[in-house]
Amino acid sequence: MNKPLEVVVSRSKSVEDHVLEIIEILNHNSNEVDLKGYGFEINKAVDIYNALKDRLKEGITLEEVSIGSETKDRKRISYLLLRIKRSY
Amino acid sequence: MNKPLEVVVSRSKSVEDHVLEIIEILNHNSNEVDLKGYGFEINKAVDIYNALKDRLKEGITLEEVSIGSETKDRKRISYLLLRIKRSY
């Protein structure tokens, strides 16, 4: 129940699917989840966080937000990382 | 030279246009700029920040990253806010 598990936003999964996946992880696998969105999935990551916050309210806190870029196949791609923690 | 000026990411402007706009502001108008992207422009906000960081390197610091949502025309829209500060 220690290391944050990483969830990468997928183009093919809905916001709701990701919300349920994260709730599942926070309930059973880890107190923290790193939600990471690359490129066009960055805005979806924010939508997922907002939907999750609506659902769980004070049950989660946003520990950290970080942005940066990584090189993939010689192309640079921006990312947004949201570290979400279960409050209790 | 005090209050952070807000730049909202525009669908019609290129990443490079926004980079130049922010450099202009940091040089002449304010030490801090709030770069805000809504909805589909959220990922562009991150691209703009990364391009600006490439250009100015240690010349800027990312003071704060925040996310949330606002209601516009009864629709809820996610946003990402990046507070960029001139280092020297």
Image (tube, coloured by chain):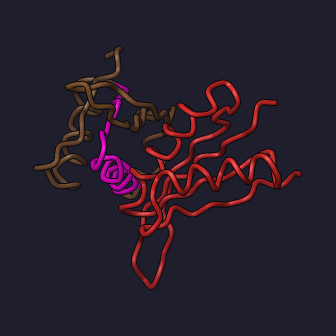
Chain colours: A red, B brown
Say which of A61 and B65 sits in front: A61
Magenta stretch, main secondary structure, is helix
Return the x and y of residue A84 as percentages of the image width and height. 66, 42
Q: How many marks?
A: 0
Left-right relation of A23 to A69: right
Q: Is residue A14 above or below residue A50?
A: below
Say which of A43 and B44 sits in front: A43
Return the x and y of residue A9 as percentages of the image width and height. 51, 61
Task: Tell me the residue at 55%/55% (across/down).
Answer: A18
Left-right relation of B24 to B30: left
Return the x and y of residue B62 as percentages of the image width and height. 49, 39
Say which of A25 and A41 sits in front: A25
Of the 4 image quadrants, the one containing the C terminus of chain B is: top left
Q: Which residues are magenta?
A: B31-53
Task: Tell me the residue at 23%/41% (across/down).
Answer: B9
Q: Is residue A57 above or below residue B53?
A: above
Find the residue positioned furthest to the bottom: A73
Left-right relation of A8 to A40: right
Quadrant position of residue A75: bottom left
Q: Is residue B46 above or below residue B62?
A: below
Find the residue positioned furthest to the right: A1
Return the x and y of residue A54 as percentages of the image width and height. 53, 31
Task: Tell me the residue at 43%/83% (across/down).
Answer: A74
Left-right relation of B41 to A38: left
Answer whether residue B6 is magenta in the image: no
Answer whether residue B48 is magenta in the image: yes
Task: Tell me the residue at 35%/53% (across/down).
Answer: B43
